[in-house]
Image: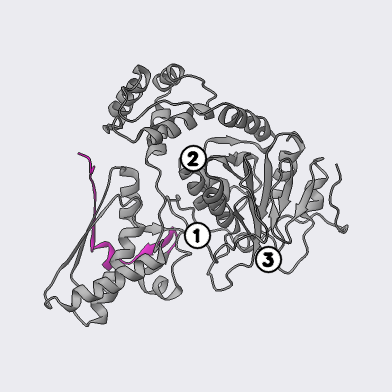
Amino acid sequence: MKKQKGKKRPARPQPRGPADKAAPAAKVAAPPTKPELAAPIPEPPEPAVVPGFPIVGLGASAGGLQALEEFFSNMPVDSGMAFVVVTHLHPDQPSMLSELVGRKTAMPVTELKKSTIVEQNHIYTIMPGRNVAMFKGALQPMTPDRTAPLSLPIDYFFRSLAQDQKDRAIGIILSGTGSDGTLGLKEIKGALGMVMVQREESASYAGMPQSAIATGLVDYVLAPAEMPAKLVAYVKDAYGTPPRVLAREGVPQPDALQQIFVLLRARTRHDFSQYKGSTINRRIERRMNVHHLDSLKRYVRFLQENPAELDLLFKELLIGVTSFFRDPEAFEALSAALGVVLSKKPDNYQARIWVPGCSSGEEAYSIAILLHERFAARRRPVNVKILATDVHKASLDFASAGIYSEEHVAGIGQERLSRWFSIKPEGFQVAQVLRESIVFAPHNLIR
């Protein structure tokens, strides 16, 4: 097959970008959050069909070129997948990425200059200074939002890939500093996709792999050369056979599924037997595919022999995606409604809010900010009490600490960021006055 060629350069530059200029002082474990897309994704210029094959997004930064070369040197040219490489490239310098990757594979390599419908057994790379999004099976080059405080091209693509391709989205995070890609992998996992991360000791820069691994949601941690074989095996198991029907609404559940619920309840004290059947099907089957298990009975045995898998299944069943002011229009409407409510209340009125399913706290803090702003706008003493609850203790502990990395606060406007956060060595600390407004507590709505 013919490879695309570019101009020869005297040196082989490593992908780099804003996140590589200085490594953060400390890594902050990533909560289930994501920033909003910098700009709406437009319709493709020609009709596109959502492809029926997996699309693999590879995110890399400093040291990522070597990892990409090792990966594609070992990837079969007829895997049936498509690959989109997203790296941190200097916006003012030409890129040789397509040519360098093309030297390691017989697959066609295309630098994305226009809307492109994805094809199997093809590799696509971004241009310097551009983002890329997935929309209805087509890759859309996008101009980044220059007003955003941080450029996160990997998170940007992973999010749109998850939204567009659902369970056929696969994300791979390779060498790099910072934590770009961590928020996007949460989106991929929430859509029932799969995530691989480069083993830390094999990475030239371990910041991005460490941040991703800290979520506890990564399916495989491997060296780049080991990834292709595992990826091919996973795709064969996940998409090569019809989906299994493990549970049906209103139909008695098989004994093996009941045994899984027993094991989960003993481990977590939560009963999943009344969960929606389709959700149970997808989540359990995904874990079975990860371990190449073809029957519920084998998976039960695997759970009994590997209690840590129960923790991973528990997380999988509870995956939620959140961020500060995640739905701007909804928060604008809420702010306006709060203004109307407060205008009719006496000066000593206490605003009391319950945020069920608060996850890692971003929604609760966003509502607290709105309330404080509304009280201040009416020149009233702030009197706010928010109860934020969730079943997941680790998320509650994270929320109570109120410390978020630079990537996690990227979607907050600069004015609010300066007013409600302070910079600490560990990350961005939520203001004490907001933390005092909220009580985080464990609670199960069903129980």
Comparing 179 with 42, the one in front is 42
Quadrant where the C terminus sits is top left
Task: Single out the mark in the foreground, 2 or 1.
Answer: 2
Query: x and y percent of residue 402 in the render?
Result: 35, 58
Circle 1 is placed at which residue position?
Answer: 407
Q: Which mark is residue 129?
A: 3
Q: Secondary structure at mark 3?
A: loop
Relative side of 238 to 256, left or right: right
Query: x and y percent of residue 62 in the render?
Result: 67, 54
Label 3 neighbour load within 10 Å: few <14, some 14-19, many 20+: some
| Amino acid type at image mark 1 | Glu
Query: x and y percent of residue 130 in the render?
Result: 66, 64
Task: Single out the mark in the foreground, 2 or 3.
Answer: 2
In magenta, the rendered stretch is 424-447
The quarter holding residue 126 reads bottom right
Q: Earlier in the sequence, mark 2 or mark 1?
A: 2
Query: x and y percent of residue 83 in the render?
Result: 68, 45
Q: Is residue 420 above or below residue 58?
A: below
Comparing 52 with 259, the one in front is 52
Residue 130 among magenta residues: no
Relative side of 6 to 433, left or right: right
| Amino acid type at image mark 2 | Leu
Label 2 neighbour load within 10 Å: few <14, some 14-19, many 20+: many
Residue 441 among magenta residues: yes
Q: CA distance from mark 3 to mark 1?
A: 19 Å
Q: Is residue 384 above or below residue 83?
A: below
The quarter holding residue 177 reads bottom right
The answer to whether marks 2 and 3 mark residues whose Cβ atoms lie closer than 8 Å is no
Circle 2 is placed at which residue position?
Answer: 192
